Image (cartoon, rainbow, N blue to C red):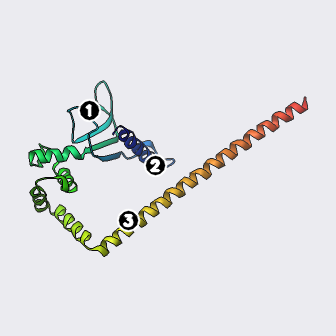
Amino acid sequence: MGDLKYKTIRSWARAYGEELKTGEAYTTQPPVVCIAFVNGSLDEGENKKIHKCCKIMDIDDHTTFTNALELHYIDMKAFVKTINETGDIGKSKTIETMLANWLAIITEKDIEDKSIIENICKEQEEIGMAVSTLVRLSEDKLTRHEYLRRQDDIMLQNKKARDYELMKQSVEQEKNRAERAEAEIEILRKRLAELEAI
């Protein structure tokens, strides 16, 4: 779990750095929110929270320094444990109700009282529709195969785009190195000419 903190900070930093275009004012940079669904707590001891939100703040007066960074960690194990212990998904028992509803759907296999899931699907029309669509898609092998193929295509396109960007950066770095080397050679030529003139 220790590495996860640093991985999410790194992901946030990368996303934050990519948002700002050359020549744009820093104030135009939108905030970046990083959300990690974790299977265990980042906290030590008994003070384990389902939802942990981290920001940059002043250590003396605890005021938020900037809203540019938000890291959210959602402990799925603690969420399921709370649901199974209380038999309830109410806001006071867990976290924001709509988020809790979706988390319950995601962790459905681990929730002991299946009526909780049924009630969510009845009360929240969009969640019920999403669940029935997922069930239908998982039963239709052809549709599922097409969906997986599309996902593979998207991943391949993303990889090609990342590879292209890395190659472009590498070429730019090599060009910069070559320019610096040429400048250093020119300086050495001038020094050599000065020495020969003496």
- Three-letter amino acid code at disc 1? Glu
Image coords of residue 116 (percent x, y): 11, 55
- Three-letter amino acid code at disc 3? Gln
Query: Neighbour class for label 1 at 10 Å: few (<14), some, many (≥20)?
Result: few
Q: Is residue 100 left or right of residue 152?
A: left
Q: Is there CB contact under 8 Å for labels 2 and 3? A: no
Give how far apart the Cα atoms at labels 3 and 1 are: 37 Å
Residue visible at 44% across and 46% down?
A: 14
Report helix, strand or loop for mark 3. helix
Give how far apart the Cα atoms at labels 2 and 3 are: 24 Å
Rendered-image quadrant of the N terminus: top left
Quick check: 18 above or below 118?
above
Tell which tag, 3 or 1, sits nearer the viewer: 1
**Which is more toward the observer, 42 or 25?**
42
Image coords of residue 74 (percent x, y): 26, 45
Residue for badge 2? 18
Query: Neighbour class for label 2 at 10 Å: few (<14), some, many (≥20)?
Result: few
Residue for badge 3? 151
- Three-letter amino acid code at disc 2? Glu
Q: Is residue 81 left or right of residue 70?
A: left
**Which is more toward the observer, 24 or 144?**
144
Report helix, strand or loop for mark 1. loop
Mark 3 vs 1, N-terminal side: 1
Q: Could you say which disc has been placed on residue 110 in the image?
A: none
Image coords of residue 110 (percent x, y): 18, 52
Q: Could you say which disc has been placed on residue 44 in the image?
A: 1
